[in-house]
Image (tube, rainbow, N blue to C red):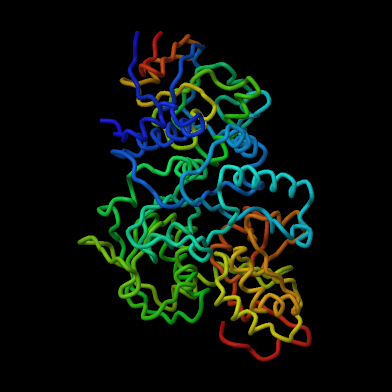
Amino acid sequence: MGPELTKKERCMLDGECGEGKQQAMEILLALAKIYGAKGMVPVTSAQISGVSYKTIGDAGLEYLQDLAARGTKVEIPACLNPIGMDSEDWEGMNVPEQFAEKQLAILKAYVSMGAKPTCTCTPYLAGVRPKAGEHIAWAESSAVIFANSVLGARTNREGGPSALCAAICGVTPNYGMHLEENRVADLIVKVDAPLQDRSDFGVLGAIAGGVARGRAVAFRGIKKAGEDELKYLGAAMAAFGSNSLFFMKGITPEWRVRDGAEEMAVGGVEMGRMRKSLDSGPEQDIITTGCPHASLAEIKEIAGMVKGRKLKKPLWVCVSRVVKEVAAKRGLEKVISDAGGRLVADTCMVVSPMEEMGYRSTGVNSAKAVKYLPTMCGQKVHFSRLGELLEFEGGKGKKVGKR
Amino acid sequence: MILKGRVIAGGHARGPAMVTMQPISFLGSVDPKSGVVVEKGHELEGKSIANMVLVFPRGKGSTVGSYIMLQLKKNGVAPAAIINLEAETIIAVGAIISKIPMLDMLEGDMYSLIKDGMVLEVDAEKGEVRF
């Protein structure tokens, strides 16, 4: 039996709602067949990947322009993944002009279809925050695992075209993470190590993701974890193991563990070993944080660390534009820029053309960034705690805060 | 002979079969201007897939491959139709946006039934390959 469509979905497939919706429904139907979905499920928001010119190139740009030229529009709130540059400050970032032109053309095509130019991997920090049980169609892997695990929303890891089709039709094939029977952990990770800061959560995520390989993970033994810590954990799990769901006893809204689930313990030794393997040495032409995009709380903390001092190396704090604007209003952006840092909106170290901007080595506190910077940007990566990455004129000085 | 299959992208096409047992990545492995396979060591290296009924197991590599298929179509060098063992997202999306008829999961062993150069008629409305 193939997937069953509702009357409205059938109308879209038959072309009664325009060519763009017809093609989008055709794609969703093909995906439903491939993944064995019985039908579609309505979604309340979409987050679309395949937005950086660096990843989709001229081929992707042409496709989006064709689609937009046909008058195709999105049906539900849709935001975008980070692009290859700050859309308002690309010159300040030293992004090549030719790249910028193409990038702006991609953005224009999406916006003309009705997508919001909110380019972020953290839509939940930028006004698109689904509630528990809500079905959504998100694409960026760290946003997907955060939405499923921390917010209790339901989404598969969509690809760029499938998330765009979901935005255009307002539905997505009903399989995988949309079905409660699949939201069960097959691996229990008992944590017996101090988790001092966000980078430790990334290290734990790299270990758990590498073992789980896509299976949902249930963590025990973690007493306290805020949203920023869970964001770093999930991002690393998704990057190292393609995971899209975890549970944490007493912290996440859901907790389901399969009888007979595999168990593993993670202690200080495993944490230390992974931390060491993530670091390829102390060189850093630039320091980047905000992978995933920084919250206001993180920006406040960074401002506290750099206030009244001069950074030796450039610092990028990658954020969504929404959060950047709040940080600017509260004077936090000025504190960071006075110290020689920069709040970089819409983009991040991984999707911007860092290698074309002359950087060879990058300091990061995110395990996810360690995974992608060498292959996507040709960078040598120094992985450490943020407090240790930041070096100031006139010596490192006293440690400012443990983060 | 008629082989039944599952419709992934609708349409109708006729052309000679080009068969490979190896998965294909469109990004980086096929030149979008000429339709020639450029991946080093691929069974089809140096051959043009233009207007062929391309028979291969599945896609691989980057999801941008879907958009490369559209470029091939615009440049007039896309395959006439695609037959996969089992479709995955990249090739399925690429076939639909490029309007390349596509079937998968043919009944019987497609590799013993379909030989290189055989002229195939792909009816991706009925879900049939005729030859």
In the displayed structure, A191 sits above or below B109; it is below
Where in the figure is residue A122, as x and y percent of width and height?
52, 62
Residue A69 position by quadrant: top right
In the displayed structure, A236 sits above or below A116; it is below
A319 relative to A183 in the view: left or right: right
**Near-viewer residue (A45 or B44):** A45
In percent of the image, x 55 and y 71: which residue is there? A295
A132 relative to A204 in the view: left or right: left
In the displayed structure, A399 sits above or below A295; it is below
Q: How many numbered circles does the render carry?
A: 0
In percent of the image, x 57 and y 65: which residue is there? A293
Residue A118 position by quadrant: bottom right
Could you tell me which quadrant the N terminus of chain A lies in?
top left
Could you tell me which quadrant the C terminus of chain A lies in?
bottom right
Q: Residue furthest left?
A: A259
Where in the figure is residue A302, as x and y percent of width and height?
62, 79
In the displayed structure, A157 sits above or below B52; it is below
A291 relative to B22 in the view: left or right: right
In percent of the image, x 48 and y 51: which residue is there? A77
**Near-viewer residue (A336 or A76):** A76
**Near-viewer residue (A278 or B127):** B127
Where in the figure is residue B20, as x and y percent of width and height?
49, 24
